[in-house]
Image (tube, rainbow, N blue to C red):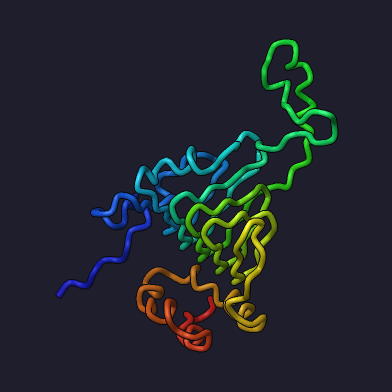
């Protein structure tokens, strides 16, 4: 019997009968968006339009970086730094973008403080209609509850929820988080991941460590 082939990270729809699920790496074209292998977005309308419908106000140089093996539920959105307005004067209105004589004051909107790139680690689960604000860093293995508004950084293996999102709990102890980050299963060779899917999904940290590939 011929063994099953490994899943293909270059296929847009890993489940052909479920076109609402799309891997993002094959469909994202913007040089300002980086997505790791097997990260997917689920949307009944058009998951392949993620970079235009779910990454908003992406006018500036900041990047959106999403790791491998992330699960993004329907309606997850990332607000980028281009959404920023001045708040140090009487008006927050961005006059220069209207053009004409107002355009000569473009420096008033180009010198706004920025928080830098938005970074999502590996193996992150972001729930339905969660909103991630500019410059946020979400750690590896984190979980973002549905409807959350993430305004601050999320620690590795943290579970956050609410508006604004707050830390609800840690999935593992500090010691185990350190071990998980060192194991970094998402960087294992695909055949090795395939051999140990059950341990990765349902095993303990000790079990994961026991099946880790030899260090190079």
Pick the residue in front: 117 or 129: 129
Labels in figure, total? 0
At a point 55% along the width and 66% down the height, the residue shown is 143
Q: Position of residue 109 (x, y in %)?
A: 75, 29
Quadrant where the image shows the N terminus: bottom left
Residue found farthest to the left: 1
Q: Position of residue 62 (x, y in %)?
A: 65, 42
| Residue 103 shown left or right of residue 41 in the figure | right
At a point 67% along the width and 64% down the height, the residue shown is 166
| Residue 63 shown left or right of residue 10 in the figure | right
Residue 91 lies, with reference to residue 182, above or below; the image says: above
Residue found farthest to the top: 101
Residue 64 lies, with reference to residue 184, above or below; the image says: above
At a point 40% along the width and 75% down the height, the residue shown is 192
Pick the residue in front: 88 or 136: 88
Q: Position of residue 105 (x, y in %)?
A: 79, 20
Residue 113 lies, with reference to residue 7, above or below; the image says: above
Pick the residue in front: 161 or 198: 161
| Residue 112 shown left or right of residue 174 in the figure | right
Pick the residue in front: 28 or 89: 89
Location of residue 158 by image quarter: bottom right
At a point 78% along the width and 40% down the height, the residue shown is 113
Q: Position of residue 129 (x, y in %)?
A: 50, 52
| Residue 6 shown left or right of residue 200 in the figure | left
């Amino acid at each position: 019997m011929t063994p099953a082939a490994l899943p293909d990270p270059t296929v847009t729809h890993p489940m052909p009968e479920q076109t609402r699920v799309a891997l993002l790496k094959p469909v994202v074209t913007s040089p300002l968006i980086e997505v790791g292998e097997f990260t997917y977005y689920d949307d009944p309308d058009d998951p392949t339009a993620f970079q235009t419908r779910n990454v908003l106000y992406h006018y500036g140089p900041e990047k959106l970086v999403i790791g491998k093996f992330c699960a993004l539920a329907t309606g997850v959105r990332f607000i980028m730094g281009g959404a920023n307005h001045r708040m140090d004067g009487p008006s927050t209105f961005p006059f220069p973008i209207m053009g004409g004589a107002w355009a000569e004051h473009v420096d008033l909107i180009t010198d706004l403080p920025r928080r830098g790139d938005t970074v999502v680690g590996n193996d992150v689960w972001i729930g339905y209609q969660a909103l991630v604000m500019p410059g946020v860093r979400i750690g590896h293995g984190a979980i973002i509850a549905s409807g959350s508004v993430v305004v601050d950084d999320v620690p590795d293996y943290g579970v956050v929820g609410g508006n604004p999102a707050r830390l609800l709990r840690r999935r593992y102890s500090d010691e185990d988080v350190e071990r998980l980050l060192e194991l970094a299963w998402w960087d294992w060779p695909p055949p090795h991941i395939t051999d140990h899917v059950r341990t990765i999904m349902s095993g303990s940290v000790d079990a994961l460590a026991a099946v880790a590939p030899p260090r190079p």
